[in-house]
Amino acid sequence: MILREIILTLIASSCLSSIAAAQTGFPGPSTIPSPSTVEHTQDFSEVVVPITSVKITPSVKVSILGKVGPKLNLDANFGTGFCLDAACRFIVTNYHVAMTTRTDKIKREKIIQRYLATGPHDQGATAHGLSNGGVLPYATKRDLAIFELRRSLPHHHGLTFSLDELQVGQQVDIYGYPNGIINPIRKLARFPATFKAPTTSGLLAFDYQLSADKPIRIHGASGGIVVDRKTEKILGILSETNETMALAVPVQTLVEFVSKVQPFLVQRIFPTTNVSPVSADLYPKFMPAPDHYPKFVPRGADRLQHRPEEPYEVSVLRKKAQLLADSMRNFIAVQGFAWGSGDKEPSAEAAYEVRVIDGVQRFRTYPDGKKELEETPYPHQNGWVLPADEWATLPKMVGTEFRLKVHQAADVVVNEQRRKVFQYYANVEDNLCPFEPVEDYFFFTIGKTIAVACYGEVWTDEDANIVRISEHLELSDKLKVYRGWEECQVVLTYGWVKLADEPKRLVPLTIFTEARFKKHVYWCRGQFTDYQLFTSRVKIVANGYVQSLPP
């Protein structure tokens, strides 16, 4: 059973459980020259940023006369990054730049999270020499990292990306911050180039030219962008250079990376990829006829006609949904949360390790939490929504256990992939979608569970594997019992993961909850990472012998 609660207080109000909500009383323009034949509309100094780390350590030196004096050692590392999103809260650069600079800030904004696309244990990782004589192993084709900043960079913004196939000889420009003659003083530079060919390692190769006043190589520009000269769309991320050729990571690799670490962000930047974690339903609400799936229909005085056989595709969906629900009775993952309202950026974020054992969900603060929690703590803000365990309960609802009313709609093509679409509806009498409004008077609460109707869509691939499920609660702000809440919904997406020697498993990827209180819309974006799947083996003791059940 899915439990939903709403708590409204004299000072603050909240809606808890599978949908939980709360509501209370309420460098100047770039000086880089451009070719005379192309009119550039973008100020790339508002897109590309320098990444610098300088460490000064005092020491001593001995002069030729044998005198001891002070000395300052300068350890400086340079790289380039660029704005990933429109608000410029996420900065993309190379993995090797992120690991060598080890910077804590970009343009004085603190880095709160680092996402790395590769590492020393990545498949295909090879050793790369560093300028200081060290060695850094990583996979060249995934030489990417993303910095999440505490706040967006003012007066900066992202660009659009191109996933089109490049043509040999296509004219591009490379933008980055190469080392200046006087380190660490650098300025944004543009290097005209042409596309040469893709490499066997999965990178893009470009021929470029340096003018007399440019350095021999583009040191410090790694992590910069390669843009099409005509459209000014980003084509790649600069990774390596030699005297005449530059190598870049393709945008498609960046899409795959962002899809894993920031699935809600990827849909805003690359809207034609995968299934959006905040996608809307494709069809109007499904309302079964009163006699839909009748338990029996009189045929004669002495016999009954039982419920007819349901369509084959629906029966397959039920089995697949039940299998998915059963497969998630034991697993561990990290669940991230981001709370916000309207179109604003998240106002609060948190992460918890979710541990499910025999279907029972528990949490602990990630990564250092010791105490086991039955529910995640509420965010410290006035209005919020909070998901629960819909990732397991919704597949179970459309599975074989409850025999919920399910209808198959017409197939659709979403982002060039065919999807089967099923619709379900649960009546109030099904008692599968209870809703509990609770009035919180600070020192005590008063609540009453109310059964509500709910409906939604299930999207599957062509093999009936679930990729998306939605749920909508039938609430109305006109009914006092709902305390002004309406338009409560949940959207879940699922995908495949493979760990070690385990077979591939279908697991929840994202969970999005949203509810409206009067004119305010509150949401919570959640994503699952770092899966640890496990099973338990039961032993039977009989007549002094221990027998293990087969796996």
Image: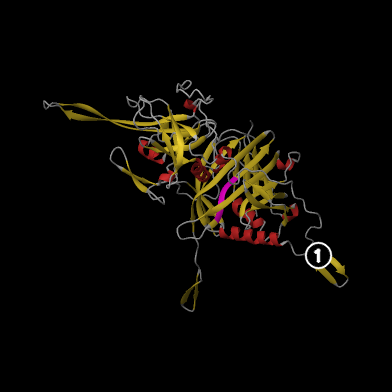
- Toward the bottom, the furthest residue is 543
Residue 86, placed above or below residue 492: above
Report the residue at 63% width, 60% height from top: 320
Residue 232, placed above or below residue 349: above
User: Residue 52: horizontal and vertical position, in percent?
Assistant: 38, 31
User: Residue 309: horizontal and vertical position, in percent?
Assistant: 75, 65
The N terminus, quarter of image: bottom right
User: Residue 83: horizontal and vertical position, in percent?
Assistant: 49, 33
| Residue 203, picture quadrant | top left
Residue 171 showing in the rendered view: yes
In the rendered image, which residue does mark 1 sit on? 296
Q: Is residue 249 left or right of residue 414?
A: left
Q: Is residue 179 left or right of residue 459?
A: left
Count of picture labels: 1
Residue 503, placed above or below residue 52: below
Q: Which residues are magenta?
A: 506-511
Q: Which residue is more in the foreground, 214 or 283?
A: 214
Residue 14 showing in the rendered view: no
Q: Is residue 510 left or right of residue 413?
A: left
User: Residue 329: horizontal and vertical position, in percent?
Assistant: 56, 58
- Toward the front, the furthest residue is 169
233 inside magenta stretch: no
**Three-letter amino acid code of the residue under disc 1:** Phe
Main secondary structure type of the part rendered in magenta: strand
Q: Crowding at label 1, few (<14), some or many (≥20) Cα neighbours within 10 Å?
A: few
507 inside magenta stretch: yes
Check disc 1 and report its element: helix, strand or loop: strand
